[in-house]
Image: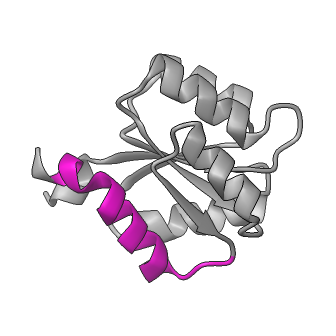
Amino acid sequence: MTMKENIDILVVDDDPEARRSIAEMLEMAGYRVSSVTCGAEALEYLQENKADLVLCDVLMPEMDGFAVLKNIKREYPWINVVMVAANGDASAVRRAFRLGADEFITKPFEAQDLGLIIERVGWHLVAE
């Protein structure tokens, strides 16, 4: 079993195509992956399940990614959060980091870019 197989990642994205492709990239890289369609589902999931890292889309209906990030950092400060956005709008990036995001990535991205970000954010998880 590799170190990556010990890392649980939750993908939160209302776009089914994006959610599926991100989950596939992560699974192919050897991570354990779960996915949900909205912020409320993400918070519900985290009450019952373990996640080391959450990849969360910024723009979602009802509860946006910033609200999800705020909730996760308040309730589960040990969980790493990588925000995902369709555009790298500087104010969104600043806001995400102000709210405690560990990293920010802009869609579309390649599997290797996502892998580097996860390694950078989750290096301590692999080292444990």
Does residue 95 appear in the picture of this structure?
yes
**Residue 7 at x, y = what percent?**
30, 48
- Residue closer to the observer: 127 or 73: 73
**SS assignment for the magenta stretch, majority:** helix
Q: How is the image coloured?
A: one colour
Q: Is residue 3 above or below residue 68?
A: below
Where's residue 53, x and y in %? 42, 44
Residue 61's place in the image compared with 106, above or below, is: above
Count of marks, rendered view: 0
Could you tell me residue 21's position as x and y percent?
A: 62, 69
Residue at figure coordinates x 31%, y 64% from the top left: 119
Quadrant that contains the N terminus: bottom left
What residue is at 24 percent from the left and 58 percent from the top? 4
* Numbered range of the magenta stretch: 108-126
Check residue 69 for magenta coloring.
Answer: no
Q: Residue furthest right?
A: 61
Q: Is residue 119 magenta?
A: yes
Name the residue located 23 percent from the left edge and 56 percent from the top edge.
123
In the displayed structure, 71 sits above or below 3; it is above
Residue under the image location 49 percent in, 17 percent down: 75
Residue 126 location in percent, x, y? 18, 53
Q: In front: 95, or 23?
A: 95
Q: Is residue 89 left or right of residue 84?
A: right
